[in-house]
Image (tube, helix red, strand yellow):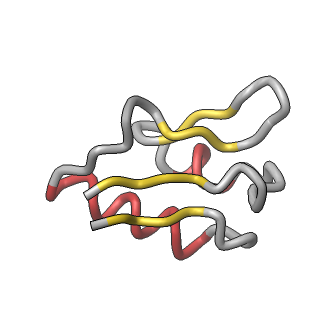
Amino acid sequence: MKVIIDAELCQGQGRCFSMVPSLFYFDELGSGVVIGDGTLTPETLNLARLAQANCPEHAIFIEE
């Protein structure tokens, strides 16, 4: 499983990287960026789902 952020949908609200800094950071424009290649472990899957549920733009996707 992988987590991705759709850069076109992200408006830089910052919830993903403030809630789950182990999976996300922000770029020079303040938009969310996935750390690494986005591969999720069983432990990080729930964190990714938390960020996904709290993204106001629904820009976070979890791919199987």
Q: Quadrant of the N terminus?
A: bottom left
Q: Quadrant of residue 33?
A: top right
In the rendering, at what x and y percent does residue 46 appear?
30, 65
Q: Quadrant of residue 25?
A: top right
Q: Is residue 50 left or right of residue 9?
A: left
Q: Residue at x 40, y 59 (%)?
A: 48
Work out whether 26 lies above or below 42: above
Q: How many marks?
A: 0
Q: Quadrant of residue 38?
A: top left
Of 42 and 38, nearer the camera is: 38
In the rendering, at what x and y percent does residue 6 appear?
64, 56
Of 8 and 24, nearer the camera is: 8
Q: Is residue 17 left or right of residue 48?
A: right
Q: Residue at x 75, y 41 (%)?
A: 31
Q: Residue at x 72, y 28 (%)?
A: 27
Q: Residue at x 77, y 55 (%)?
A: 8
In the rendering, at what x and y percent does residue 12 appear?
80, 49
Of 47 and 57, nearer the camera is: 57
Work out whether 58 lies above or below 3: below
Q: Residue furthest left?
A: 42
Q: Residue furthest top?
A: 28
In the rendering, at what x and y percent does residue 37 appear?
37, 35
Q: Is residue 14 left or right of residue 36?
A: right
